[in-house]
Amino acid sequence: AFKKDQVWDTSSKQQQSFRVDFNEGMTTEFWLKKGAFGVANSREAIFDVRDPINPSASFGAYVSSSGVSNLYAYYNNASHNFTLDLSTGLTASDTDWHHYAIAYSRDGNDYVAKLYIDGEFADSAANTNANVATTGTLKTTIGALGGDFFNTASAVPAGYGKLSGSIDEFRFWQETRNAQQIGRNYFSIVNGGGNTDTSKVNDDNPLKLSAYYKFNEGKPGVAAEGTNCSL
């Protein structure tokens, strides 16, 4: 699993690289080749964003051996927690590479997640609750968890829920990408920027592509941001 601390530059008033806010919107994209589940009745994390200081805050997605045709998006905060079931339309025997995009937004009083598979809309799900944004010292883990799934068991160590499979081209956007944006760009490299260039990234021009891991640097177990091997 690969973990990245968020970056926050107070001198330039840059926005956080990672924040969970359905009002502003988010989109996660990744290629996934799922192998057989290592343990029966298990859940395996695709990615996990959490606040290591606030034990009630975590956000991410996982797959489960009890629902192999589904992908599950979860969000836990100080007020409520929920899991959205999204149907992939894929079968357990499908071990090919597929591109997944989950676009998060608000619709009235609902949290909404829309799932796209290989650039095509697959499913959507919603949960009715008042929006709660999560900011602060957020950390992202890819291919495992930073703790337990619901961030309530402090004894569960980072690395729990390890993914049995391969993941590639992970992108985290601080905006809700639409069907056209996803469909046109899922099969190609996109241009992004780091939040160290204050002339390009600041309060007036927030960072939209918060994280982009291509996993193409060729060193097993080491991932360089913005650099073709899978994790």
Image: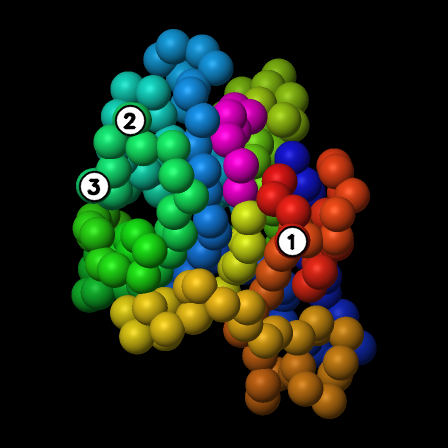
Give the mark nearer the N terminus: 3 vs 1: 3
Judged left or right of residue 6, residue 72 is: left
* Distance Cα–Cα, label 3 vs label 1: 27 Å
174 or 39: nearer the viewer: 39
Magenta residue check for 162 = yes
Q: Is residue 83 visible?
A: no
Classed neighbour count for the residue bearing mark 3: other residues with Cα under 10 Å, few (<14), some (14–19), many (≥20): few
Range of magenta residues: 161-167
Identify residue type, mark 1.
Asn
Tell me the residue that label 1 is attached to.
228
The amino acid pointed to by label 2 is Ala
Q: Residue beneath label 3, please?
A: 89
Q: CA distance from mark 1 to mark 2?
A: 26 Å
Front-most of residues 42 and 117:
117
* Circle 1 crowding by C-alpha within 10 Å: few under 14, some 14–19, many from 20: few
Quadrant of residue 219 within the rendered picture: top right
Question: Which residue is painted at 28% across and 63% down in the image?
Answer: 106
* Residue 96 pos. (x, y %): 39, 39
Residue 201 placement, left or right of 110: right
Q: Earlier in the sequence, mark 1 or mark 2?
A: 2
At x 65%, y 47%, the residue is 229
Q: Is residue 159 above or below residue 98?
A: above
Q: Height in image: 74 above or below 129? A: above
Q: Could you say where residue 133 lies in the image, as x and y percent from the top left? A: 45, 57
Element at label 2: loop
CA distance for labels 3 and 2 = 10 Å
Residue under pointer 2: 92
The answer to whether 41 is drawn above or below residue 15 in the figure is above
In the rendered image, residue 179, in percent from the top left (x then y), is placed at 28, 69
Residue 228: image location, x then y, percent: 65, 53
For the N terminus, the quadrant is: top right
